[in-house]
Image (cartoon, rainbow, N blue to C red):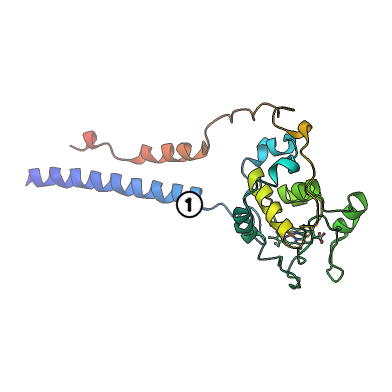
Amino acid sequence: MSGDLKWNKIFGAALGTAFVILVVQQASGLIYHSEPPEKMGYFVDAPDEAAGGAAEVELPPDWGTVLPTADLAAGEAAFARCQACHDAHQGGADKIGPNLYGVVGGPVLHRAGFAYSDAMTKHKADVPTWNYDALNSFITAPAKYVPGTKMSFAGIRDTQTRINLIAWLRTQGSTNDPIPAPDPSRQPGAAAPAEGAAPAEGAAGAEAPAAAAAAPAEAPAPAAAH
Ligand code: HEC
């Protein structure tokens, strides 16, 4: 009988430990999974490495070189990210955003009937035309390039994706817009972007281990149960 009692204690201790582990797992689950979404609204394409800011330092593409070799099919596929808000077909309706047929090389505010933001109206005074550089800057980070724009889109950070997209958009009503001649000052090597972002310090989630460490103190030590 005393043997049974001993086993009872051991099982009890094991059960207790399992219980504590479960509680800790649940608690850390709550910690890890309770972050609210960062932004509300339409789509948010998370900009990769937004903090690094490397994209801002980058030279603008040399359109005369990159447009003729752009991947139009990939550009059309990339337009899926715009399609919820924009139609690019000739005669297509305005949606949440204006129809984009002919926008490449066209005037800013190119759709007469569309209710543009004040921000975009002001932008037109600075840069009246959607030339390749302007489009590229806008699509990279709309709210940065036109602060206050009502285009709720985080932007496309990948340069080649933007090039493909702009090249495809050009085929939608803008093939008369000339492709500029190659520009040596924009070719790779003309300027080097600043050194990469400093290495991130510390490990992520430093709080969690502390919380976990507090709980095991309560776990019964099997050795003491005799
Ligand atoms: C969430 C909806 C939404 C998405 C997604 C979106 N746009 Fe827009 N877009 C808008 C709105 C709204 C405007 C009008 C902006 C303003 O008035 O400030 C706009 C304006 C524009 C303009 C200026 C048009 C003009 O007539 O001056 C261009 C160019 C443009 N968008 C391109 C794109 C491209 C390319 C994509 C995909 C990479 C995209 N947009 C994704 C909503 C969107």
- Position of the C terminus by quadrant: top left
Q: Residue at x 71, y 47 (%)?
A: 140
Q: Is residue 2 left or right of residue 126?
A: left
- Judged from this view, the residue extending furthest toward the right is 125
Whether residue 158 appears in this view of the structure is no
Q: 219 or 125: which is nearer to us?
A: 125
Above or below 225: residue 131: below
Q: Position of residue 46 (x, y in %)?
A: 62, 50
Q: Furthest residue to the left?
A: 1
Disc 1 residue type? Leu
In the displayed structure, would residue 86 be above or below residue 6? below
Residue 71 drawn at (x, y percent):
62, 50
Q: Is residue 130 visible?
A: yes
Secondary element at image label 1: helix
Mark 1 residue crowding within 10 angstroms, few (<14) / some (14–19) / many (20+): few
- Where residue 96 appears, as percent x and y from the top left, is 73, 68
| Mark 1 sits near ligand 1, with its Cβ under 8 Å away | no
Quarter of the figure with residue 97: bottom right
Q: Between residues 160 and 171, which one lies in front from this camera angle?
A: 171
Q: Is residue 71 above or below residue 98?
A: above
Position of 48 with respect to 99 (left or right) is left
Is 17 left or right of 167, judged from the image as shown? left
Relative height, residue 57 to residue 101 (above, below): above
Which residue position is annotated with label 1? 30
Image-based side of 22 in relation to 79, left or right:
left
Q: Quadrant of ligand 1?
A: bottom right
61 vs 24, nearest the viewer: 61
Which residue is at 29% across, 47% downward? 18
The x and y percentages for residue 66 are 69, 43
Res 75 → quadrant: bottom right
Q: How many marks?
A: 1
